[in-house]
Image (cartoon, rainbow, N blue to C red):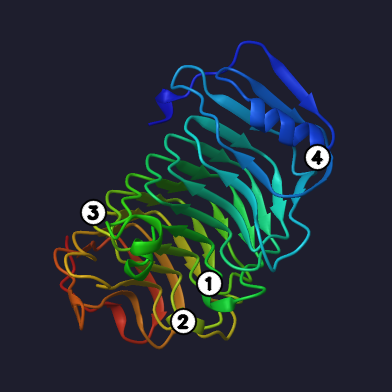
């Protein structure tokens, strides 16, 4: 999927204050590059114009570029409603939500920091597909509502489909979460994969359990409710007393979902009472089927063992 991204050859726009940044985002055209000078940019920022596969729009700055929503009680700091953007390097903080995407496809988010957020840090929502978030860091989420303090949230709960997708499944498909550090002090799951989403890749990430609160049943690094996800080469740590029960969980939250996910080559430092990888086979909503846990997963100090299903060789 990376091959869809080209690079603007010219037309670099440099901004140094919030007004200039908002204007640059509002007027962005395919092939442009917006360079943000170091500094604090107060406000909520919206991206609505798209690039193209061969002429993406780049938004870039160092970690010393801070998009600051000014309060973790309300607002999205960065609201992406467009396709073919590359967002690199910046810090996002002090919003109810950090980065939210809606109807946003083929975007790359690379090397950002999201912190000091009232609810979830990054949310791919409302048919946002084929996006990548990589090499990024997330910490201190759920400062207003710990129940909704996920690090990365893919899709929407079935209860929210009437609100966002006219009661259809929120098909946020084929998104990739690669080589990120999520936690500590993420109050809900590091990653929550919702029913209605299909075919994502979760690879090479590091999860830290310190700060998971247990609110709204958050007691694992990851909760998988979608179908056909590949979860591989991740490292989960739980080195301090916490509410963690299992390392990874698969759940059926709606009939037909929570199926055919694969776990391979993960390292699970669980240090808790449950499984390394718990496949919750049946619920009042239906049955999770076709999931595989391979024998190359390493699980440390999970009181119930590696998993509750037959291990795949």
Instruction: Mark yes or no: residue 200 visible.
Output: yes
- x then y, percent, for residue 219: 45, 80
Q: CA distance from mark 2 to mark 4?
A: 36 Å
Tag 2 near tag 1, CB within 8 Å:
yes
The residue that label 4 is drawn on is 18
> Which of the marked residues, 2 or 4, is nearer the chain's N terminus?
4
> Which of the marked residues, 2 or 1, is nearer the chain's N terminus?
1
Q: Is residue 27 above or below residue 129?
A: above
Mark 1: give few (<14), some (14-19) or many (20+) Cα within 10 Å: many
> Which of the marked residues, 3 or 4, is nearer the chain's N terminus?
4
Where is the C terminus found, in terms of image quarters?
bottom left
Residue 291 in which image quadrant = bottom left
Q: Is residue 110 above or below residue 275?
A: above
Q: Is residue 152 above or below residue 3?
A: below
Where is the N terminus found, in terms of image quarters?
top left
Residue at (32, 56) in percent of width and height: 166
The residue that label 1 is drawn on is 148
Judge depth for marks 3 and 4 and give the one in front: 4
Q: Is residue 60 left or right of residue 232?
A: right
Q: CA distance from mark 2 to mark 1?
A: 8 Å
The residue that label 2 is drawn on is 216
Residue 25 in which image quadrant = top right
Q: Secondary structure at mark 4?
A: helix
The residue that label 3 is drawn on is 228
- x then y, percent, for residue 195: 30, 63
- x then y, percent, for residue 147: 53, 77
Residue at (41, 24) in percent of width and height: 4
Residue at (59, 68) in percent of width and height: 119
> Which of the marked residues, 1 or 3, is nearer the chain's N terminus?
1
> Which of the marked residues, 3 or 2, is nearer the chain's N terminus?
2
Q: Is residue 86 left or right of residue 274?
A: right
């Amino acid at each position: 999927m990376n091959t869809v991204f080209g690079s603007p050859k010219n037309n670099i726009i440099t901004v140094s204050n919030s007004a200039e940044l908002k204007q640059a985002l509002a007027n962005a055209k395919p092939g442009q590059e917006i360079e943000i000078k170091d500094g604090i940019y107060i406000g909520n920022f919206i991206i609505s114009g798209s690039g193209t596969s061969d002429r993406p729009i780049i938004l870039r700055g160092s970690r010393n570029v801070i998009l600051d929503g000014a309060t973790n009680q309300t607002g999205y700091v960065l609201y992406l409603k467009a396709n073919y953007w590359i967002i690199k390097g910046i810090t996002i903080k002090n919003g109810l939500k950090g980065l939210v995407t809606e109807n946003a496809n083929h975007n790359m988010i690379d090397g950002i920091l999201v912190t000091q957020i009232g609810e979830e840090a990054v949310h791919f929502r409302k048919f946002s597909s084929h996006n990548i978030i990589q090499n990024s860091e997330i910490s201190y989420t759920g400062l207003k509502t710990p129940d909704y303090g996920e690090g990365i949230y893919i899709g929407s709960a079935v209860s929210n489909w009437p609100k966002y997708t006219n009661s259809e499944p929120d098909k946020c498909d084929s998104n990739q979460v690669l080589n990120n550090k999520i936690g500590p002090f993420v109050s809900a799951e590091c990653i929550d994969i919702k029913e209605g989403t299909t075919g994502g890749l979760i690879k090479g990430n590091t999860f830290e359990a310190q700060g998971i609160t247990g609110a709204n049943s958050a007691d694992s690094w990851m909760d998988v409710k979608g179908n056909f996800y590949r979860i591989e080469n991740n490292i989960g740590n739980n080195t301090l007393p916490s509410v963690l029960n299992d390392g990874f969980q698969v759940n059926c939250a709606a009939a037909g979902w929570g199926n055919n996910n694969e776990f391979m080559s993960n390292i699970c430092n669980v240090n808790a009472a449950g499984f390394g990888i718990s496949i919750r086979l049946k619920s009042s909503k239906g049955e999770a089927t076709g999931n595989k846990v391979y024998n190359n997963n390493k699980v440390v100090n999970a009181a119930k063992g590696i998993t509750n299903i037959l291990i795949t060789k």
